[in-house]
Every structure is written in structure tokens, then in C-alpha cells.
């Protein structure tokens, strides 16, 4: 069993992995369009004793909802534009229902591990919403939602939430910093690909 914090970080790979740089972004600083909040839920669910980590992300993107949707649902090609994804594959299970299997490369201090994650992903194209649940791999309980909305000032607002029961705890103060850095890199990488596809049209 891999350390819980590495498994938790791998959750972000479902549609975004760590980026090596934010080149290609607009002149606006990434921090100006990106918000992240991490909280501890006690208990994780009613009548359960375990705790959960919740991660909430808001990202303003200078691209149409359709372009953003195409990128975040391009699971089959995700490893081509997400730097720390070793592989990503998609198996259709039904209309707007897919199973995603990914192997992510995660580094933490001197450790470098590969994290396998298997998700059942429900797609809601009309609402531009995605609901994902981990069903196998190196993770414990994980659920994620992604929702795209028109931004009042133009472009697209991406809202992402993840709730995970990672098992034995490390202090949240440590987890918070790690998760925040990982998420910032992950969504920066995603933003670069979205803007690349927008500009290629």
C-alpha cells in the first residue's frame, strides 16, 4: 500500500497532472485565475469515524466551454499533454459512461512512485458536468465532480471538488501544502493545453 498522501495526489490525475511550466498562459498570472481550498471533513460521512480531505478548485479559463470540455474529457490522449501521466486509457461502458485507467508518476522528496487509478466516470454533456468515483487501483475512497459554467467576464469557469478518505493521517498542515502545490501544477498544465487548442482553431 502506497503512502496515503501520494495516493491522494494521484486523484488529480483524473483529468489533470503536474505541469513542468506554465508557458503559453496569458500575461495574467496563473494565481489570478486559480483558487484552491483544502479542508478536513470530520467525519467523512455520517455514521463513519474516518476523516476525509476535501479539495475545491475554481479556475477561470479564456476559452469556450466546448473547448474546455473537449480537453478535460480527452482521457485517451491525456498522457500526451499531461507531463506526469505515464499512460491513460478509456473503456466505454455505455452512453456518457466510461471507465478510465491511468498510471501517474508521482514524486515526493526522494521517493518516485507510479500510482495506478481506475475511475468510473459519468459524463453529463448538456450540463457540462463530470462525476467520477475511484473503483480500483492504489486509492481508497475518492469521489470527484467537475462543472463548467460561463464566466461573467467571459470565457469559462471550471469548478472542481474532490473528497477522499486517504486512510491513516498525516497532519493536514503538511497535506495542505503538498496538495496545493500539486493542484496548481496540475491545473496549469491543463490550462496550457486548453489555450493551445483554442489558438489552433
Image (cartoon, rainbow, N blue to C red):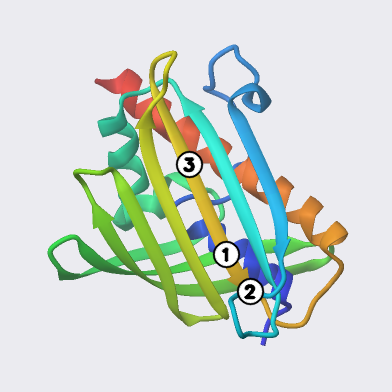
Taking the image as shown, residue 154 lies to the left or right of residue 55, namely: left
> Which element type, helix, strand or loop, lies under badge 1?
strand
Q: Which residue is mark 3?
A: 159
Looking at the figure, which quarter contains the C terminus?
top left
Distance from the alpha carbon under mark 1 to that under mark 3: 14 Å
**Quarter-of-image position of residue 113:** bottom right
Question: In the rendered view, would you say 31 is above or below 148?
Answer: above
The earlier-in-sequence mark between 2 and 3 is 2
Whether label 2 touches label 1, CB < 8 Å: yes
142 with respect to 44 (left or right): left
Q: Is there any visible trace of residue 21 in the rendered image?
A: no
Give the camera-side residue of 161 and 71. 161
Secondary structure at numbered mark 2: loop
Picture residue at 51% right of the left edge, 75% below the top: 116
C-alpha distance separating marks 2 and 1 = 8 Å
CB contact under 8 Å: marks 2 and 3: no
Secondary element at tag 3: strand
Q: Left or right of 106: which side holds 67?
A: left
Q: Quadrant of residue 130?
A: bottom left
Q: Is residue 111 visible?
A: yes
Sequence order check, earlier mark of 2 and 1:
2
Seen in the image, is 70 located left or right of residue 52?
left
On the image, numbered disc 2 is attached to which residue? 44
Per the image, the residue denoted by label 1 is 163
Amino acid at each position: 500500500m502506497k503512502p496515503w498522501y501520494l495516493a491522494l495526489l494521484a486523484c488529480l490525475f483524473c483529468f489533470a497532472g503536474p505541469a513542468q511550466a506554465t508557458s503559453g498562459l496569458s500575461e495574467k498570472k496563473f494565481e489570478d485565475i486559480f483558487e484552491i481550498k483544502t479542508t478536513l471533513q470530520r467525519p467523512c460521512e455520517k455514521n463513519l469515524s474516518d476523516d476525509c480531505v476535501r479539495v475545491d478548485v475554481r479556475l477561470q479559463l479564456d476559452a469556450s466551454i466546448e473547448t474546455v470540455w473537449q480537453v478535460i474529457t480527452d482521457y485517451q490522449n491525456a498522457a500526451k499533454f499531461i507531463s506526469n501521466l505515464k499512460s491513460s486509457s478509456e473503456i466505454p461502458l455505455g452512453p456518457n459512461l466510461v471507465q478510465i485507467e491511468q498510471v501517474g508518476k508521482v514524486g515526493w522528496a526522494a521517493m518516485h512512485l507510479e500510482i495506478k487509478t481506475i475511475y468510473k466516470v459519468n459524463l453529463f454533456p448538456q450540463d457540462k458536468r463530470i462525476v467520477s468515483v475511484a473503483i480500483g487501483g492504489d486509492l481508497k475512497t475518492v469521489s470527484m465532480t467537475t462543472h463548467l459554467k460561463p464566466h461573467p467576464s467571459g470565457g469559462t469557469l471550471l469548478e472542481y471538488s474532490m473528497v477522499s478518505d486517504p486512510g491513516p493521517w498525516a497532519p493536514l498542515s503538511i497535506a495542505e501544502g503538498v496538495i496545493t502545490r500539486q493542484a496548481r501544477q496540475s491545473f496549469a498544465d491543463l490550462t496550457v493545453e486548453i489555450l493551445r487548442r483554442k489558438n489552433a482553431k
